[in-house]
Amino acid sequence: VGKALDRAKSLERISAHNRAATRRRILLGLAQLRDAHRELSQVLGIAAPEPSSPTGFTPTNPPDKAPNTPRSEEETDLDLGDLDREDLAPHEQRLVEAVLSAVSVLEDSLKRASQACIPAGELGTPQASLSELEAAAQAAVAASRAVEGLTSNSIGGLDRDGFAVSLE
């Protein structure tokens, strides 16, 4: 009885609209790509761009602190700055930069796919068939899985075998 109730509860969260369910899968892949983008940017020592909303609307959240607010002694003690940054060999850095570039292209593609899931009745949104959106959702899952493997196998020293498996 308990398992049946749990299954019934999970059905409550399933979207009755295929476009919404497909968009949710695309957004999940997009979130994983953004995490990889952030990790790769940190390894390279560059600031990751602020993610915008896939719908084009960017919520305004007040910052925790103003940019020029002095940091407390505890915050400066915990900040290791460049000391905790991994030094990459030149070939590893080029590889991480290439993966980061690919992640950026994939992010842009998934943003457009997510926007295409919005019904065409709303202004400025392109119309896409459900089969095209399903293909985009499947590609989002595959891309996020591949990028996760590429990222984990290129950070902290290149694992050639693991990297090659991620490309398959």
Image: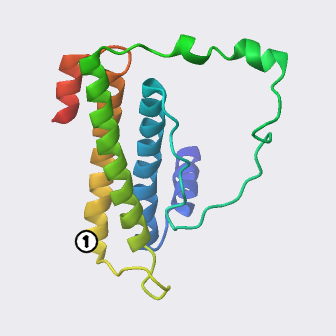
Nearer the observer, 147 or 89:
89
Q: Is residue 15 above or below residue 43?
A: below
Residue drawn where x is 31% and y is 68% of the image: 133
The amino acid beneath tag 1 is Ser
Q: Position of residue 160 (x, y in %)?
A: 20, 18
Left or right, 24 with reference to 153: right
User: Is there any visible trace of residue 22 in the rendered image?
Assistant: no
Of 3 and 54, the residue lying toward us: 54
In the image as oriented, which residue stretches furthest toward the front? 68
The picture places residue 31, in percent across and down from the top left corner, at: 47, 47
Give the total number of marks visible in the rendering.
1
Residue 43's place in the image compared with 41, above or below, is: above
Q: Tell me if residue 114 comes above or below residue 66 in the rendering.
A: below
* 79 relative position to 54: left or right: right
The colour scheme used here is rainbow
Q: Which residue is mark 1?
A: 131
**Residue 167, quarter of the rendered image:** top left
Depth check, front residue: 130 or 124:
124
